Amino acid sequence: MGIFWPYSPPIMNTFSSDFITKLRHLEHHLKSNIKGQDHVIPKITSVLKRGELGLAHPSRPKGSFLFVGPTGVGKTEITICFTNYLFGEDHLHRFDMSEFQNQSSVGLLLGNSVSETGMLGRALAKHDRGTLLFDEMEKAHPLVLDLFLQILDAGRITLANGETKSLNDYYIIFTSNIGAAEAMRMESSAFATIERTVLRRVDQVLRPELVARISEKLVFNRLPFAIQRDICEQMVERERTRLSKLGFVIEVDAATIEELVREGYHRTLGARPMRSTVDRYLQDFVCGNLLELKE
């Protein structure tokens, strides 16, 4: 399929060269920061690029994703990563759906009276664009899932105070652990087989009209030992950089990295224990040195 421009498309005049360069580097940025999930990144960047270039449907969110997989494999991390890259910090609004399991949850989200806007309304008041992340969506009450249908289909939501909020400049992310147990039991199977199994389970658990409205349904890999080692090195470097800004310069040798990997590796919890291990080790090291200086 080819495309011919008889002249420069008018839409291109609205974007700066820096913006275009930023979009070109988006996939590389995600692959540099998110380990073990290279197979989902091209699909994510495809939706994001279309959204940022104004090609998404104008009456819907810029894009929507369902990220499925075991805990601690990067579903939330990749959401944070692309949101910070495209919009800057503080443009990600996260909702834990385990807090929205009963019928009154709709009021918690949208407000209980005409004087309230709810958690969603307060989040949308902060910025006119960004990302809405709904963690563990399968735990939400069916009435909350009905709200998601409206958000995905119409790109807007009406709050309890009567105000209608547009979501046309937002990305909508759902995460879920549906099928994670099955995936962990199939660790010796080909990923294509695991993917089919997980997505089939998603279709069994979630309403088909909701799944059909989500732009991309992506299954994340579990993180094997070698990938968790790479993540450990990345976490160490990030924490070293953070602490150096506070005035503490730390050198971490290869033997220490191996020790951290052995302690932080977890087959089922992914990289979450690794983060705690790295933070504890480096911060304890700084604490010990500070206290020695005060003796």
Image: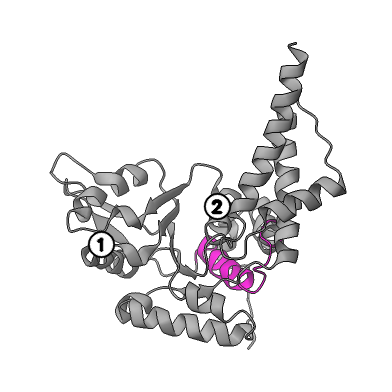
Disc 1 packing (10 Å; few <14; some 14–19; many ≥20) = many
Exactly how many numbered labels are in the figure?
Answer: 2
What amino acid is found at the position of numbered circle 1 in the picture? Val
The N terminus, quarter of image: bottom right
Percent of width and height locating residue 130:
46, 51
Graded by Cα atoms within 10 Å as few (under 14), some (14 to 19) or many (20 or more), the crowding at tag 2 reads many
Boundaries of the magenta span: 31-54
Q: Is residue 128 left or right of residue 121?
A: right
Q: Give the main secondary structure, helix, strand or loop, of the magenta stretch.
A: helix
The secondary element bearing badge 2 is classed as helix
Query: Residue 2 is drawn in which quadrant?
Result: bottom right
Q: Quadrant of residue 240?
A: top right
Type of amino acid under label 2: Ile
Mark pair 1, 2: CA separation: 23 Å
Residue named by callout 1: 144
Residue 42 drawn above or below residue 266: below
The color scheme shown is one colour
Q: Is residue 125 above or below residue 289?
A: below
Instruction: Name which residue lies at 73% across and 20% down.
Output: 290
* Picture residue at 13% right of the left edge, 43% below the top: 114
Q: Return the disc, 1 or 2, that comes first in the chain's sequence.
A: 2
Can residue 121 be seen from the camera position used here? yes
Check residue 166 for magenta coloring: no
Q: Which residue is mark 2?
A: 80
Question: Is label 1 in a helix, a strand or a loop?
Answer: helix
Question: Residue at left 55%, top 75%?
Answer: 184
Measured as percent of width and height from the top left, residue 208 is found at: 32, 81
In terms of depth relative to the viewer, which is nearer, 58 or 110? 110
